[in-house]
Amino acid sequence: ARLLSTWLKLLSSKTFWAIVERDTIESELYSKRNISVTDALSQTPLKTKG
């Protein structure tokens, strides 16, 4: 869940480092759980602080 929340925060940024971090998170998620970010987002309930 932590990778996904970080990925979502980086989604709004178009800077080079954010793009690289999103790619890194996508690779990590695929290697750990063998699913894509879209699959993980549709399966995992996201909690927001508030």
Image (spheres, rainbow, N blue to C red):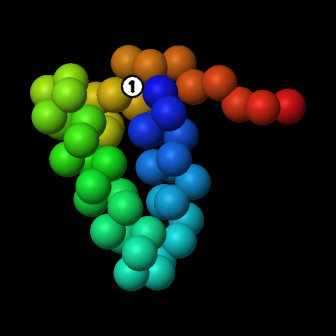
**Quadrant in the picture for residue 18:** bottom left
**Amino acid type indicated by mark 1:** Ser
The image quarter in which residue 29 lies: top left
What's the residue at 27%, 59% (across, down)?
23
- Residue 31 percent across, percent down from the top left: 14, 34
**Residue that mark 1 sits on:** 42
Image-quadrant location for residue 4:
top left
Residue 43 visible within the image: yes
Tell me where residue 48 appears, x and y as whole percent.
71, 31
> Percent position (x, y) of residue 7?
45, 49
Look at 20% across and 28% down and name the residue there. 32
Q: Is residue 13 left or right of residue 31?
A: right
Q: Residue at x 43, y 38 (%)?
A: 3
Quadrant (top left, top right, bottom left, bottom right) of the C terminus: top right
Q: In this image, 26 relative to 17: left or right?
A: left
Q: For residue 35, say whether it is visible.
A: no
Secondary structure beneath disc 1? helix
Q: Is residue 38 above or below residue 14?
A: above
49 relative to 36 in the view: left or right: right
